[in-house]
Image (cartoon, rainbow, N blue to C red):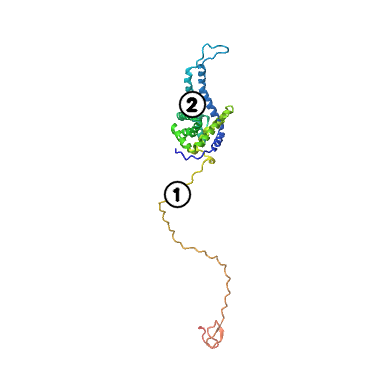
Amino acid sequence: MQSQNAPSVRWEWISEAWNLFTKQWSVWVLMILVMYLVVFAVYLPFIGIIGLMMPSMPQGDEIPTVTPVFPTALLALYPVVYLVILGAVSYLLGGLYNAAFKQLRGEPISVGDLFSGGPYFMRMLGALVLIAIGAGFGGVFCLIPGLIVYGLTFLTYPMIVEGGKGTIDAIKESIEITKRDWIMFTLFAMATYFIASAGVLACGVGVLATMPLLPLTQALVYRDLAGMRGAQRQGQFMPPPPPPDYRSYAPSQTPAPPRQEQPWAAPTYLTPPPQPPQPAQPSRPESTSATCPHCGATLARTMNFCNQCGGSLRSA
């Protein structure tokens, strides 16, 4: 997956993470509660072992005859304790981040997702160790470099869980994205870690509601800066898409199909509206008399011979 150009830090990621938490708050509270119970159950046997190995102290006014000696075996046991706890935390953190990305994709989440970190266990463990070493080494130099380490590696765990990267590649990819705005990412990481752990101040119970903000916020940052398939995007926090580059469009080389000429048809003209029938004109009465061409006498037209001179009227 190729990283996109990192925009400026968006503090709205924290409020969006809170909105996601409130939609599934009961599941997240139970997951954090189970996570702490599992870590405590892993740590409990070591507490008993350490208690048995501790030298006995004199009771009341009893004067010790031998100075208690701190068992050397305890020095070797403490690294084992921290390594086992770190392994349990790595496994559970993988499931916690997996649940965060499932919710971003709109999938249902459950407490069982907390135990789905098996595929990421070794990579998460390596990232936890390397980041802790880097932050601890940087903290020696006036604390500020250690905080910068946390800011630069802010996307390491999402890179492992969602990006499928190895430990070293995930750290490199996170640094490649965050270094473009490393000052703001350092401040943002400090604020996110502080909010996630602030619930400890409320008698430790408030951490059940604040700890989920850490994986949810990191998942949202990964979604916007590295890209995530199938994520449900809330447009108010997403950068607008870049405008299309119309210069990259070349004119088509395919010739246009020839235009088909339509056969000529005689134009149709509008016919005038029909005229109302005109009244018939009275015919001129035909004359009933005739004039004799021979003598000029006026005769009836029906006669054939003039009754005055006897001439024929047929030529008249």
Give the labeled residue for mark 2.
86
Tell me the element at label 2: helix
Mark 2 Cα-neighbour bin, 10 Å: few <14, some 14–19, many ≥20: some
Residue at 51 percent of width and 19 percent of height: 50
Q: Position of residue 114 (x, y in %)?
A: 51, 29
From this view, report whether residue 251 is shown above or below residue 286: above
**On screen, residue 61 above or below 246:** above
Q: Nearer the viewer, residue 268 or 307?
A: 268
Tally of numbered tags: 2
**Residue at image mark 1:** 247
User: Which quadrant would the N terminus be assigned to in this image?
Assistant: top left
Residue 279 position, x and y percent, is 58, 71
Q: Position of residue 87 (x, y in %)?
A: 48, 26
- Amino acid carrying label 1: it is Arg
Q: Position of residue 229 (x, y in %)?
A: 48, 38
Q: Nearer the viewer, residue 252 or 56?
A: 56
